[in-house]
Amino acid sequence: MTSLRAETSVADLPTVTFGQRSLMWWGTLGFMVIEGWTLALLLVSYLYLRQSVIQWPPAPSQSPALLMPSITLALMALSVVPAVVVARAGGRLDAPAVKRWLVAHSLIGVAILILRWWDVQSLGVRWDANAYGTAVWMIVGFHTSLLLLDVLDTLGLTLCFFVRRQPVKSFSDAADNSVYWYFTVGIWLPVYLIAYVGPRVI
Amino acid sequence: MSALGNSTIDGGALAPEAVAQNAGALERTWSTKPGVWAWVCTVDHKVIGRRYVITAFAMFLAGGIEAALMRAQLARPENGFLGADRYNQIFTTHGTTMMFLFAVPMMTAMGLYFVPLMIGARSVAFPRLNAFGYWTYLVGIGLLYVALLTNHAPDTGWFAYVPLSETLYAPGHRVDVWAQLVTFTEIAALCAAVNIIVTVFKMRAPGMSVNRIPLFVWAQLVVAFMIVFAMPAVAAGSTLMLAADRAIHMQWFIPARGGDVLLWQHIFWFFGHPEVYIIFLPALGMVTPIVETFCRRPVVGYGAIVMANIATAFFAFGLWVHHMFATPLPELGDSLFTAASLVIAIPSAVQIFCWIATMWTGRPRLTVPMLFVLGFLFTFINGGITGVMLASVPFDRQAHDTFFVVAHLHYVLLGGGVMPLFAGLYFWFPKFTGRLLRNGLGKWHFWLFLIGVNVTFFPMHILGLDGMPRRIYTYLASTGWGPLNLLSSLGAATIAISVIIFLVNVVLSWRGGAVAGPNPWGASGLEWATASPPPPYNFAYPLIVSSAHPLWDAHAALPVATGLRTDRREVLTTTTFDARPDARHSSPRESIWPFYLALCMGVVFIGSIFRPYWVLIGTALSLAGLFGWGWQSTRPIERERIALPNGALVERT
Ligand code: HEM
Ligand SMILES: [Cu+2]
């Protein structure tokens, strides 16, 4: 083997980083793209099915009710606040603030998850009634599975922070958790517009 | 040197004793302990990559046995060897195995093994995700092959067209097996893709800026992006749509309730066409370093090849409709997609011209890998020509669903995928085993394979033009198709013999082949800068790169970076574009959770075939696994150097 020559030392580089300097952030981003794209394909399929009928939703189905989904939407918008605060506090390694706001985030997350029950009732159609019902159920259902995962993730993280002292890397994880939350909330917006508001306009 | 910023030191040559001591410590930190438990828990990308390659190759053999059975059935007219039902199961399992369980996993497995070595990294970005992907893939294999052996294999073709695959026409669980198997392989592919993207973006050797990335790595990167956009389509189609239609009476594809059968074809081919390139681009990526090494010169047109890869990926998504010319679609669409199908030939041609120019201006040596490259050029160009023919709508309407298409797709897949793969296996075998494959047996393998492929598939063009439909289990003697079919079956037997020779070669050489040493071919990539096979930590020190051919351009000593810890698993991350050293990250230890989680996913997807409530049980078990996985990544607390988002660098426990 050829001999080696030391040209630089990396000993002074950090071992904990935030955002796009950390591997976990990239991994989270990758899964966001995959999940977002899957949802986009479902939405496109919904619009594709819409093309072949005159009336949408097809009779006897009716357009979904808007009240409860709109309340959920408002609560989702609100939930971004604790997520942002957690991310900022994480970036300062401020453990008490992270804990406090993770609890707030978890509580709102659980509330949104519960409200989702009424969102689904608002659809007013069974999944096996017709292709329209199938499409909206699958879209809302898929988003709900992401939501569930994210809420559980937040709960797990909160638990970890309370149960035992965390390595500093967990602050970076908490910040990434917020990024994933923005995504989960963000992709609900097209779902809300297409699945709930959509039937009234398209 | 200044490319690395201000941390440049000149430590001079490293003393051999220091290097040896460093290697000893790394060995203790990075090696997987012996034993069954550790075997299941390992996260070493090389162990998993090798396992992946061997498993995928076993699937090539399984698919090959199915092919042999089909060719035996078709060898004579009115043959009673298999019968219609078995034949349907076998051609479906053959197509499914070859596409989902051999070709794509094989290509990603080669990436998972070699990408870190080629970019000078110690591991992949997410070692446990990597293990999880492999186990998921294995569970999927188990599902399909248990079904085949118990006479429950899918029988509606590897594309499972609705409505044939809906409950009405396909009662029982055969199609469910197909639908869920597909999802297993997609999850595995997505895990690999995310891993490869992040590994290439963040873990390249210092100095390996984007214009110095090896072309195989470029191909893997582009393909990983293709996987991210193609695989969700088929996973959505097969599980969220088809399996859901069948299990809980959803109505995606049932016209009586407003569903649409063409939606399936759009979703499937939106994945299915890019999939061909997902197989083909990594294969082309293997060709370049082989041509470079055996012509002893850098490839002509590095930039052109990178652009060709990106352009191929881009166009590949725009032409799924050419699989649907025989369906009632608007005419304008037809001509648009014909044009797109013709355009995509251009980037492939660019790559081919680059290699020809390299050979022309270099001094080619006809080693076995080079022979396979030449065989690839010959066979693939044939398949490309019939592809251009099929892109023309009037011709496609004639040839659709005949053996002409079978001929075309096998010329492309065997010529464009399998031959480069064999070239790559001969070339990189030392990096798996430390030994070289035998030359003489390799030549036998090559010639018999080349002859076999052409004798098997060339006659199918003629049979197809003569009207022999595909997916039929037999035909009447009065058609006159008997002799050419017999010839084709003899060709298949030749392929089988050649593959057996390859297997013999692998077994003999693995045990007693010539010891290769680090760089037996005098190649230029970083994977050749470490021992064959590489140690668990890949490289004793991160190598510093200042050209696209580091081993050819390095002079006296290889420049390296020091300062990574040896007492715990640490990897170096670099900046995305110019690859300046950026941070040290810890890399996980062995873990049981990936294996556990893959089994739970098995409960979710396989259980859903029989009773929907298994989805809930499996999900609950999976969530427990996710929690365990997360819990485990909280290490004992020690002093860390932290780069805060505001740029400050602090130290804390
Ligand atoms: C090793 C030699 C091979 C032989 C002798 C062979 C033979 C065959 C035959 C006879 C069929 C036609 C079945 C029919 O239409 O009745 C077929 C279909 C097919 N083969 Fe192969 N094959 C081989 C390798 C491969 C490889 C390497 C791949 C992919 C990587 C592949 C992918 C397919 C696919 C996708 C189909 C279509 C299956 C369907 O229609 O559902 N084959 N093969
Ligand atoms: Cu295609």
Image: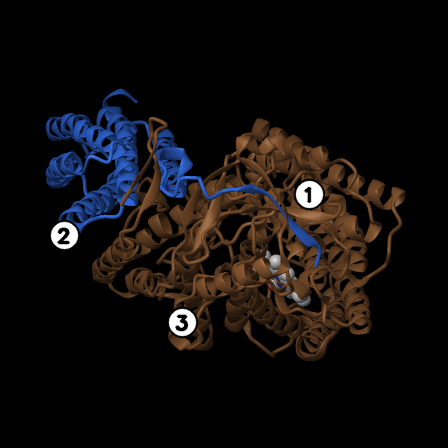
* Left or right placement of residue A47 versus residue B556 in this view: left
Helix, strand or loop at mark 2:
helix
Residue B581 picture location, percent across and down:
51, 38
* Left or right placement of residue B353 versus residue B284 in this view: right
Which of the two discs, 3 and 1, labels the residue nearer the N terminus? 3
Which mark is in front, 3 or 1?
Answer: 3
Helix, strand or loop at mark 3:
helix
Residue B50 picture location, percent across and down:
55, 65
Closer to the camera, B357 or B492?
A: B357
* Left or right placement of residue B170 versus residue B200 in this view: left
Looking at the rendered structure, the kind of residue marked 3 is: Ala
* Chain (brown): B
For the residues labelled 1 and 2, the Cα–Cα distance comes to 64 Å
Residue at screen point 76% across, 69% down: B491
Residue B265 picture location, percent across and down:
48, 44
* Chain (blue): A
Which mark is in front, 1 or 2?
Answer: 2
Residue at screen point 36% across, 43% down: B255
Q: Do labels 1 and 2 touch, CB within 8 Å?
A: no
Q: Residue B38 carries which label?
A: 3
Residue position for label 1: B390
Residue position for label 2: A163
Helix, strand or loop at mark 1:
helix
Q: Do labels 3 and 1 touch, CB within 8 Å?
A: no
Image quadrant for the C terminus of chain B?
A: top left
Subunit under mark 2: A
Q: Do labels 3 and 2 touch, CB within 8 Å?
A: no
For the residues labelled 3 and 2, the Cα–Cα distance comes to 29 Å
Residue B568 picture location, percent across and down:
41, 57
Few, some or many residues within 10 Å of mark 3 (<14, 14–19, 20+): some
* Left or right placement of residue A145 versus residue B286 in this view: left
